[in-house]
């Protein structure tokens, strides 16, 4: 007797191999860098925080290093104080702009009343951590609390002490200021402020909020151009809560051995940037929408006579393409890794109910961690850049794939397995020829859900230097530029739709025809 034909199974299996090979090829192509990078040790990595002034100073440092003959890369706007400081200590970056008040009160806050220590103490303390200091650069960008001029006049607000008599005022402080040692806690305690309506808000969005009357007071930087534009009044710090915030550069001491010319060139910036010049540069970038690279180049030409190459102009289409490649790297590689781990975990969970409860519980708890927090948790282990972002996305992809694989396998009628066992098929053959094909609709649905979620979540990777479509989104928020926000948001949305459509095609190719017809019926 002839064996029954295996044609119903051969085509779906071949289609599955083609589909997964296509996904693997996509991931590998996304993982290939657009250009060959120089050896890691030969590049000076400059970091900056996620506000415009820090980005401008980081760009100034980058161009100065390049003018000295060294190769430099600027990793701009990837986080707050602690993140960028830890990146410096780990060696993810070689230098970044900082402020003495932040350094003393926030970073080195373990020693009481450090404002009384001299510069030699600060230099020694930093050297113990492998860090050097260049500066001061020439301006003091102190904190202040500001209110609209009309409100100040109406309520007679001139000093911070005056706020005690107005508990009804609504405060909106930057998220970092809310928890800093030299921020809201110190302000509240030193002045005994009774205000209860205190919100954390992005610093740049705070100016929009106070202009529209959503908040009454916010934290200011002395060199912010919006202070003049929005007619805000900085209240006098009559109890001297805020120290001086002289701008400096912090750098790794080993940079002096690796690139002494770069460190010597940076020292030329000491005392060369006054408050007026810095405020003017901030205004050009934030109000006139001049790119930070050009703002930095124009300053260096006027202040130091440096004539570097003109800033490269990248068209919108080319910029979107580059961000799309970065985004695909994050999504495709994390998704493939999740498939390789989650499907076997789902099979294990389906075959062993006790183990299944543990597996589903663990991946479920992982899903409850806020995405931004998970990204930050990855940094101490993996540093900054694409790798920690991909690991975070991998963890977020596990739950929908594991859960759907488990559900698809446990919903198969036991009689089908019993019939296969009666025919003498081994467990591996039953899994391969019966269980997985029957569960494939749910498995693919889980993979599709993970992929679409990853496309959106990957935008947060820009906060830790992973690039992708989040970069123009966060830059647009910082500069209040809707066009930049749309350059990231629209392609990310289209990419999510494209990914969903791709998996719809894969589903038609992979899921056995009989199952698809039964689902439609």
Image (cartoon, grey):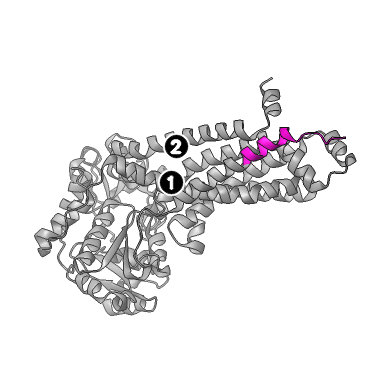
Residue sitting at the far right:
422
Residue sitting at the far top:
521
Q: Is residue 389 above or below residue 503?
A: below
Q: Residue visible at 23% across and 45% down?
A: 286
Q: Is residue 492 above or below residue 241?
A: above
Label 2: element kind: helix
Q: Where does the image place residue 272, in percent across and percent down from the top left?
A: 14, 65
Q: Which residue is mark 2?
A: 495
Q: Taking 507 as reference, is 290 left or right?
A: left
Q: Dividing the picture into quarters, in which one does residue 486 lie?
A: top left
Measured Cα–Cα span from mark 1 to mark 2: 9 Å
Q: Dividing the picture into quarters, in which one does residue 4 lie?
A: top right
Q: Taking 132 as reference, is 111 left or right?
A: right
Q: Where does the image place residue 335, in percent across and percent down from the top left?
A: 55, 47
Labelled disc at residue 98? none
- Let me know if residue 136 appears in the view: yes
521 magenta-colored: no
Tag 2 or tag 1, which sits nearer the N-term?
A: 1
Q: Where does the image place residue 311, in percent across and percent down from the top left?
A: 20, 53
Nearer the observer, 426 or 171:
426
- Let me know if residue 371 appears in the view: no
Q: What is the span of residues highlighted in magenta in the rendered image?
A: 1-16
The quadrant the N terminus occupies is: top right
Q: Residue visible at 30% across and 52% down?
A: 51
Q: Residue visible at 30% across and 77% down?
A: 123
Nearer the observer, 365 or 258:
258
Q: Taking 234 as reference, is 165 left or right?
A: right
Label 1: element kind: helix
Classified by dominant secondary structure, the portion drawn in magenta counts as helix
Label 1 with label 2: CB-CB less than 8 Å = yes
Q: Taking 60 as reference, is 382 left or right?
A: right
Q: Which residue is mark 1?
A: 327
């Amino acid at each position: 007797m002839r064996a029954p034909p295996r044609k119903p199974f051969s085509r779906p299996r071949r289609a599955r191999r083609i589909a997964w090979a296509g996904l693997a090829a996509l991931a590998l192509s996304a993982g290939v860098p657009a250009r060959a990078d120089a050896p890691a040790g030969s590049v000076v990595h400059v970091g900056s925080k996620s506000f415009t002034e820090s980005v401008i100073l980081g760009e100034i440092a980058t161009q100065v290093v390049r003018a000295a003959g060294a190769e430099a890369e600027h990793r701009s706007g990837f986080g707050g104080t602690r993140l960028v400081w830890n990146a410096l200590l780990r060696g993810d970056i070689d230098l970044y702009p900082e402020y003495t008040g932040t350094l003393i009160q926030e970073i080195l806050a373990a020693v009481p009343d450090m404002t009384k220590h001299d510069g030699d103490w600060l230099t020694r303390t930093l050297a113990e951590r492998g860090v050097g200091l260049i500066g001061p650069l020439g301006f003091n960008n102190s904190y202040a609390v500001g209110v609209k001029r009309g409100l100040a006049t109406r309520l007679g607000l001139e000093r911070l002490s005056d706020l005690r008599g107005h508990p009804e005022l609504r405060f909106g402080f930057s998220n970092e200021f809310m928890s800093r040692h030299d921020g809201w806690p110190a302000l509240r305690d030193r002045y005994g402020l009774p205000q209860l309506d205190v919100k954390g808000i992005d610093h740049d969005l705070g100016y929009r909020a106070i202009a529209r009357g959503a908040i009454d007071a916010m934290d200011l930087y002395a060199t912010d151009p919006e202070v003049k534009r929005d007619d805000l009044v900085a209240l006098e710090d009559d109890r001297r809560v805020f120290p001086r915030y002289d701008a400096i550069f912090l750098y790794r001491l080993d940079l002096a051995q690796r690139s002494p010319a770069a460190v010597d060139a940076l020292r030329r910036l000491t005392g060369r940037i006054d408050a007026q010049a810095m405020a003017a540069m901030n205004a050009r970038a934030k109000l006139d929408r001049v790119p930070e690279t050009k703002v930095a180049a124009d300053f260096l030409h006027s202040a130091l006579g440096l004539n570097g190459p003109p800033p490269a102009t990248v068209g919108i289409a080319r910029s979107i393409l580059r961000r799309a490649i970065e985004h695909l790297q994050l999504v495709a590689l994390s998704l493939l890794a999740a498939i390789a781990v989650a499907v076997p975990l789902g099979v294990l969970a389906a075959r062993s109910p006790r183990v299944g409860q543990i597996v589903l519980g663990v991946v479920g708890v992982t899903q409850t961690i806020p995405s931004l927090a998970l990204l930050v948790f990855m940094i101490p282990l993996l540093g900054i850049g694409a790798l920690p972002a991909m690991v975070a996305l991998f963890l977020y992809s596990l739950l929908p794939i594991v859960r759907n694989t488990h559900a698809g396998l446990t919903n198969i009628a036991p009689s089908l397995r019993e019939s296969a066992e009666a025919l003498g098929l081994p467990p591996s053959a039953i899994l391969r020829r019966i269980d997985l094909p029957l569960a494939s609709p749910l498995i693919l649905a889980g993979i599709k859900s993970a992929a679409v979620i990853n496309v959106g979540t990957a935008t947060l990777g820009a906060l830790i230097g992973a690039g992708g479509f989040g970069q123009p989104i966060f830059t647009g928020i910082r500069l209040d530029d809707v066009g930049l926000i749309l350059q990231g948001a629209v392609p990310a949305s289209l990419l999510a739709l494209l990914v969903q459509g791709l998996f719809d095609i894969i589903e038609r190719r992979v899921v056995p025809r009989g199952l698809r017809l039964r689902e439609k019926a």
